[in-house]
Amino acid sequence: MTPNWPGLRVVVAGIGVSGFAAADALLERGAKVVVIDPRQEQSQRERGIVLDTLGADIRLGPDAVEQLPMVAGEPAELLVISPGWDDAQPVVRAALAAGIPIWGEAELAWRLRPATGAAPWLSITGTRGKATTATMLAAMLTAAGYRATAIGQAGTSLLEAVLHPRPYDVLAVQLSGFQLRWASSLQPQSSVCLNVSGTDLDDGSLASRGRVYQNTELACVYNTADPATEQLVMDAEVIEGCRAIGFTLGVPAVSMVGLVEDVLCDRAFVAERITSAAELGTLDDVRVAGAGVLAAHNIANALAAATLARGFGVRPADVRDGLRGYRPLAHHLTPIDPIDPALAADQLKPGEVTWVDDSAATDPMAAAAGLATFERVVWVAGGALEPTANGDRIIADLDRLVAAHRSRLRAVVLFGPDRAVLREALQRHAPDVPVVDVDVAETEQVMEVVVARAGQLAQPGDTVLLSPGFGAEPFATLDQRGVAFGRAVRGRAEP
């Protein structure tokens, strides 16, 4: 049920991008809004000034988040939280204890959709590949003539998209486990959980990922190589008539999408699927989409996106054209100049050292996907663990990662505050692989030293791969980390 917005007493926790958008949308609808944030740097103050002008009550600083505030002198009726606000926060604990509804940005965006003519959601979650799949899907939908976009972390914000003055026909929606944790009323047309690994295998996290399937109308798409995703489909309460559709890197069975040799095939959304299949493209089309890096996980992402697109009615030729026209996201297995980013990996001259930026790999599963793509690697890795990460789980994930890919490792260059955790895993499972520690105080110099050390270790035919497996620190963001790596590589190549 949609709330009666005018006069609704709402606390918005966080004044970052999503919190600002949430407060702005609520104020526009006449809600009474208190915005809280423990930070009070310039960006928070600037957003606070804007929201204060619009009528919000802005409270910044550590004291502002010690308890759930009153709104206009009365108890709050709704708490809207931003990413990073977990159950341990006093504000969240207080709302749970009082039975006050808690929503994330996804739930708020869904509730604010127009009453009629709202764009259907094709929802995507998983430990790895969400952004790539969402943007691939948007490219396929656009090739079919729909006004579509990828929203969430992959592109436009959820609230911006659903409230856009020129409505979209359909939305490719990337959803994190956090967003799903605080969402209850979403009703996607089709949905997919691409994979689950690492901390997502914890009961609470797995349940959050599984929420992507709740109330799905047409198709629950799962990964046949990851049985946990199929189990999530089996456990989900869906709209009657919803189908379970698998995607596979093998030959697809009936009601699946997969590969027959180098052809992407649909045996789910064709009339005679028992005896025939529709051709959706080839691995060469996926290679173009991967900017020259034909990785198994990119094939899986393309199959998942194609399955969602076909469920929406996209023609096979438009799936193919969407793949051919797709350009990958930055820092996702991106070859670095002076290598031409459009050059296929198998066209590189023998003896060249390839430099690849996969800074978006912020966990061990993502790093494993990057390592699996290349035969011989000088691996650049490290960074910071999430403060809330399960330490034992991370150690186990790193052990599996190193043990599985040690034969590919020429050498490893480590950086970042928590690199010792990975160094210990390398000592346990790849003791013969040379490991270089980079301990530089100035962040601006870290990648210069990393690239210099990697260049000394690399031999003709090797790939130097930045696939950190950790959070961004000492850099502010994964984008900053990738840009610094690319700049250092290009600087090294200059005469």
Image (spheres, helix red, strand yellow):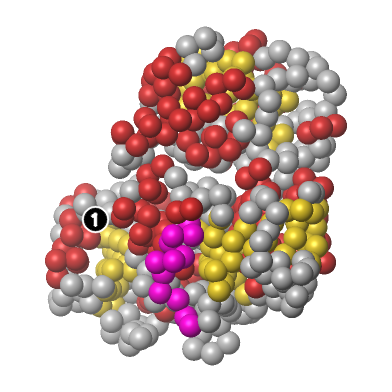
User: Image quarter for residue 427?
Assistant: top left
Location of residue 348 in the rendering, given as x and y in whole percent from the top left corner: 83, 28
Visible in this render: residue 81? Answer: yes
Q: Which kind of residue does numbered mark 1 sit on? A: Asp
Residue at (73%, 39%) from the top-left corner? 293
Residue bounds of the magenta highlight: 229-240
Residue 285 spot, x, y in % from top left: 80, 51
Q: Nearer the viewer, residue 329 or 433?
A: 433
Q: Nearer the viewer, residue 220 or 273?
A: 273
Above or below, comparing residue 218 to residue 369 in the picture: below
In the rendered image, the residue lying farthest to the bottom is 116
Identify which residue, 52 or 423, lies in the foreground.
423
Residue 300: give x, y in percent of width and height. 64, 51
Residue visible at 78% across and 62% down in the picture: 280
**Residue 179 visible in the picture:** no
Q: On the picture, is 405 further left or further right than 392?
A: right
The quarter of the picture where the C terminus appears is top right
As helix, strand or loop, the secondary structure at mark 1 comes to loop
Q: Residues within 10 Å of mark 1 (few under 14, many from 20)?
A: few
The structure residue drawn at horizontal position 66% and vertical position 43%, both measured from the top left corner, is: 296
The answer to whether residue 262 is left or right of residue 365 is right
Q: Residue at x 60, y 31 (%)?
A: 371
Return the residue at label 1.
87
User: Looking at the picture, how far across and down is residue 352, in whole percent?
Assistant: 79, 20
- Relative to 90, say whether 185 is above or below: below
Q: Where is the N terminus found, in terms of image quarters?
A: bottom left
